[in-house]
Amino acid sequence: MASVYRVRHLALGSPHALKVLNAELAQDADLRERFLAEGRIQAQLRHPHIVAVTDIATDPVPGLVMELVDGETLEDHLRAQAQPLAIDVIVQILGPVLDAVGEAHRHGIVHRDLKPANILLGRTSRGKLRPVVADFGIAKVISDHLQTGRKATRTGVRVGTLLYMSPEQVRGEANLDARSDVFALGAILYELVTGRVAFDAPSEYDAMKNIVEGRFLPPTRGLGPVDPVLDACIRKALAIRPEERFPDCAAFAKLLVQAGQANVALPQRPSASMVATQRPEPAVSTAPRRAVLESAPPPMAKAPIPPPLPPSAPAALQQARDQVNWLRIDDASRQGTRALLLSIVGFCCCPLIGHLAAVLMAADSRRVYIDEGVYGHGRWKADFAYLIGWIGLLSTLLAVLTYWFSK
């Protein structure tokens, strides 16, 4: 929807990031309002780990003037890692992010699109890692004093990035709260710990099914032992029911900072999946067995035995290939014979040209035999011509060099 430029303030000389709505989308009044609402929301959130918006431009197209964060996204950082991150690095990244998102929640804002691509990894003036949350473009305002005038999202409309959506987002529910962001942060933590995406699937349908049923590969599967605190954080944050997740980011962070420590009181595991806990019992018939059998439809007649199939096309194709291969072998045999005769003639006249031609022809003939994996049918002629040709060629060169240096 937008492009981000590195710009310089003409009066102050300070660097900034300028996020500009694409020109073709700027004609849509609803998109313009949504884009400017993002700026108003971020401008009201003053936190060291949230990208600060300092100004808004409206002409000729909408733009947000933001602080410039020099660094890569968490998504790019994870893609470049060969191994999962260490525990202390995970806490250094996700701890400030939890604090920043918690600050947004205290102001009545639900981000709804938390993912590694929306977390920037900057550095402080002293070189300390500074993760920063960005892109509040689809944030949901649930506080009256921060209303932006933007239309509410309709029920049944999914917003966000699928692989990090909560089950209630996948179902298109409108009444989302902070626990939806907690779910997305749990999916991010899973990726930090394992190096894999929690709900990755071959299709969008399968991904949505995995999310709403709470199906993901346990962090300990395939990685060996995982810190129990990190495992407990992931399981609780990714609970299907919002009431079984962390109530807020502060509770999430309180448990996360204890990662790597011993004798930590872990929370109770949430339900495994909605399918396992809410599936109704199968209906059982109370009628006698004989009555059930008599009321069943008659069995289907057996299908007639089909006639034998004609020879398949692949067999005919293979037969044609074999015929072509034998033709190549016969041609290689004749070429080997010519190479042998040419190598013999090379000793009588035109030794250099004759032997060189014999070597080239014999090499081409031998290549055909090697490709087809056979030895007979004149291969010995090609081998003998190849050997004689090289001997004659080297002898001729040696004779020429001896005559040259003896002068």
Image: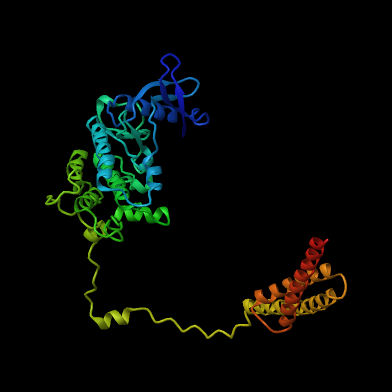
Q: Residue furthest front?
A: 406
Q: Is residue 53 above or below residue 206?
A: above
Q: Is residue 35 above or below residue 401?
A: above
Q: For the C terminus, which image quadrant?
A: bottom right
From the top left corner, tell me how far across and down residue 372 is, in percent: 66, 77
From the top left corner, tell me how far across and down residue 173 is, in percent: 31, 43
> Along the horizontal axis of the image, is 84 left or right of 402?
left
Q: Nearer the viewer, residue 311 or 93?
A: 93
Q: Is residue 309 above or below residue 59?
A: below
Can residue 159 be seen?
no
Q: Is residue 90 above or below residue 120?
A: below
> Along the horizontal axis of the image, is 129 left or right of 251?
right
> Along the horizontal axis of the image, is 393 left or right of 150?
right
Which of the 4 image quadrants contains residue 254? top left
Q: Residue at x 29, y 56 (%)?
A: 213
Q: Nearer the viewer, residue 403 or 368?
A: 403
Q: Nearer the viewer, residue 115 or 260?
A: 260
Which of the 4 image quadrants contains residue 286? bottom left
